[in-house]
Image: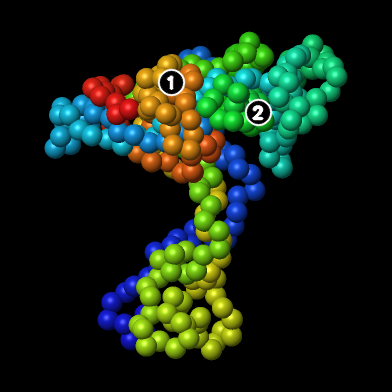
Amino acid sequence: MGHRKKSAPKRGSLAYIPKVRASSIVGRVRFWPNVTYDKPKLLGFAGYKAGMTHVLVIDDTRGSPHYGKEIVLPVTVLDAPPLYIVAVRCYETTPYGLKTLGEVWVDKPPKDIERILTIPEKFNRDEMIKKIKSNIDRISEVRVLTCTQPRLSGLRKKTPELFEGGVGGGSVEDRLEYCLSILGKEVKAGDVLKEGAYVDVSAVTKGKGFQGVIKRWGVKRLPHKSRKGVRKVGTLGPWSPAMVLHTVPRAGQLGFFQRIEHNKRIMKIGVNGEEITPKGGFTRYGIIKGDYILIKGSIPGPVKRLVRLRVAARLHKGTPEKAPQITYVKV
């Protein structure tokens, strides 16, 4: 650091460069873990972020100084109406990656789907199923296309979000039969997730617009005697090379980034939203009408943002998997 007596690197991580806006407001899931379930099962779910509260729970972490005692934990509340399965998609492995082998759509998709895509007048469902089953030896992965039902949530919106979800457990034949059996049906949070389990949370963070280097990278303010400004970097780099390196903090976009946080614990899955909704509803959200999920700690994104949950991909050994014992929920 030149003449400095101590190291003072910037607090931002270069791993996320370039810091640009997310291409979609719905979080992406680029990887689905290989699970060893006896029966096929969906590997993900989604819900709308309603707000935060806190709970009293008996600490079940082995080695913790508060083990067996009552502690206070912050939790995030997700409004989780059932997801609707609109299609089944099969992939085959090629030298260029996964390629779609075929897909089967539901005969009568929800009317709100027309807000995001054009629906053909008629689907050859039986013909597509026959084609897929005849090439079942070429199938490497089976996934489902799911859409949200915002009319069942506390949001004032009608347009659903459409995204792809992974399926794990059993053989390829079992996964295909399972996906065809739930095609055109609703899947609830309790059918996919369980209390005490760990999930990975994918969402788009809160947007903050164009910000300077102090807020964007956490660099220190210059002395008040500095020339032509204080809230900036001291130097853009040496004379040679005669260029500004990508490691130099610069002003630019902050927030609205695609992010994923690993190993978030599900504290509770409820079916009656009235027991968790405060009087007057959640601030800037409203009333939770049906199913909800409590997740330990904070998660990315502002209120009303869609949050995607995935089965933990790199779960630590020794983590408790039993449902936590909650004694009180702040409403």
Does residue 152 show up? yes
Q: Position of residue 93 (x, y in %)?
A: 68, 33
Does residue 310 show up? no
Residue under the point 50% across and 25% down: 80
The colour scheme used here is: rainbow
Alpha-carbon span between mark 2 and mark 1? 20 Å
Residue position for label 1:
273
Classify 10 Å Cα crowding around label 1: few (below 14), some (14-19), many (20 and above).
Answer: some
Q: Amino acid at mark 1?
A: Gly
Q: Quadrant location of the N terminus?
A: bottom left
Q: Quadrant of residue 140?
A: top right
Classify 10 Å Cα crowding around label 2: few (below 14), some (14-19), many (20 and above).
Answer: some
The answer to whether mark 2 and mark 1 are in CB contact below 8 A is no
Q: Amino acid at mark 2?
A: Lys
Label at residue 139: none
Q: Position of residue 139 (x, y in %)?
A: 68, 25
User: Of residues 260 and 252, which is closer to you in this image?
Assistant: 252
Task: Give the residue at the far right of this rendering.
Answer: 121
Please state if 165 lies on the left or on the right of 331 as rendered.
Answer: right
Residue under the point 59% across and 81% down: 243
Q: Quadrant of residue 246?
A: bottom right
Task: Report helix, strand or loop for mark 1.
Answer: helix
Residue position for label 2:
158
Residue under the point 56% across and 78% down: 244
Which is nearer the N-term, disc 2 or disc 1? 2
Residue under the point 28% across and 77% down: 6
Task: Report helix, strand or loop for mark 2.
Answer: loop
